[in-house]
Image: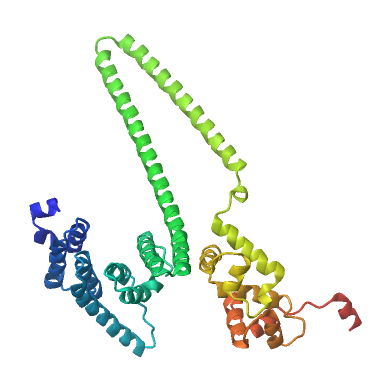
Amino acid sequence: MNYTNEIGVDSIALFIPSVYPLLSTCYLELQKPDSARFYLTKINQKQKTGNGMILNCNIADTYIAEHNIDSALIFLDKAMGEFQNQAERLRKNNIKASLPFYFLSTYSSLATLYQQSGNYQQAKNSFVLVEPLMKKTTNDPGRMEKQAKALILYSSFCRATKQYEKAVDLLMFRDSLQQIINKADKERESKNFISRLQISDLEHQNKLQETSLANSHRMVVVSTACAVLFFFFICAVGYICYQRKKRLDVIMKQEKEAELLESSATPEKEKSLTPEEKLYHAAYEKVRLQKLYLNKDIRLKSLAEMLKTNHTYLSSCINTCYGNNYNQWINDFRIDYLLGRIHSGKKLSDLAEEAGFASTDAFYRNFKRKTGLTPNEYLKQHPKKQNPEETVLR
């Protein structure tokens, strides 16, 4: 802020338009909502670019920081109106629009403000509006942190209104998000640490090179006075450098061998599983061994009760470890079961019902998704192999 004010914010904005939202964020962090709003207004007046929904949500954030609900609602209504217009245009093209992610923080903060003022109904409405955004799958660590913060606020509201089961579900989902965030932070810290080590090694090599060059320069100066001493000195320095390099090579070789031994002593299979992987494997074995997938009424909630866990957490584990949601996961069991019996001579509709599919359409859709072929195409490409004895009889 001091830097931009010293050289002129408007002159910077000619080349870097993002300086206005950046300064607005800084002032909001310093609890100066008036100054933050001033630069947001500059975006609206001078640039006339960007998404109006984002801008109105950001202005609403400045009023929420001042506990001014009425003013915040004015800009939130503008943002919501733009979203509804956009959703209506998309609906005409048969495209379903979902609430943008940047509404999450604003409505969560507004709901908390309603809660503090005792207006629990409005707080509930605001939380419910953005609840899908709290649980929306994302790979962006910044969005995950905003989701975790919103989940904490919503959980506090549920505790205040004695919705304890809901509060526990929200906290469990937040914990699963936090584990992913922590893992990403550790990986980032590890990469930063490796980078620092590499930079340190390069600096050390540069110092060694500078020292070697300085010694060489001194040698040249001394050689003008005594060629013999210069010759022996060069030989001594060369021998010392050779021995030093030789020792360094030996040390580096020993370290590499130690790393190889350590990595071979702890293979991937012996590494301890995470809690999510343990729960996923338990669910997988439960469904596979007891053939629960043959029951067309098996639901995520009932499976979670069998495993004595929360269905939201179980869903998150399946999504993370398998890469698909619960419905596709359970239907893949059914397709595998059906593929083993597709040459039995039974009707496909009977096999689909036996495998646990609720309808023939569901069977055809999931068969195509998993194999890339329709059942008839699959049978043509994978005909039943004839028994040698049957061939002889014919």
Location of residue 175 (image quadrant)? bottom left
Front residue of this view, candidates 67 and 61:
67
Location of residue 278 with respect to 346 vertically, above or below: above
Residue 51 lies, in percent from the top left, at: 24, 74
User: How many discs mark residues in the rendered view?
Assistant: 0
Please report the residue visible at 20 percent of the width from the left and 66 percent of the height from the top.
62
Location of residue 149 with respect to 264 vertically, above or below: below
Classify residue 271 as left or right of residue 145. Answer: right
Please report the residue visible at 59 percent of the width from the left and 62 percent of the height from the top.
280
Front residue of this view, candidates 62 and 271:
62
Classify residue 35 as left or right of residue 170. Answer: left
- Please identify the residue farthest to the right as the structure is shown: 393
Location of residue 276 (image quadrant)? bottom right
Residue 274 lies, in percent from the top left, at: 55, 54
Classify residue 142 as left or right of residue 1. Answer: right
- Please identify the residue farthest to the bottom as the structure is shown: 92
Please report the residue visible at 35 percent of the width from the left and 13 percent of the height from the top.
233
Location of residue 271 with respect to 257 vertically, above or below: below
Classify residue 234 as left or right of residue 326. Answer: left
Residue 260 lies, in percent from the top left, at: 57, 39
Query: How has the structure been colored for display?
Result: rainbow
Location of residue 241 (image quadrant)? top left
Residue 212 lies, in percent from the top left, at: 32, 24
Looking at the rendering, in which quadrant would you find the C terminus?
Answer: bottom right
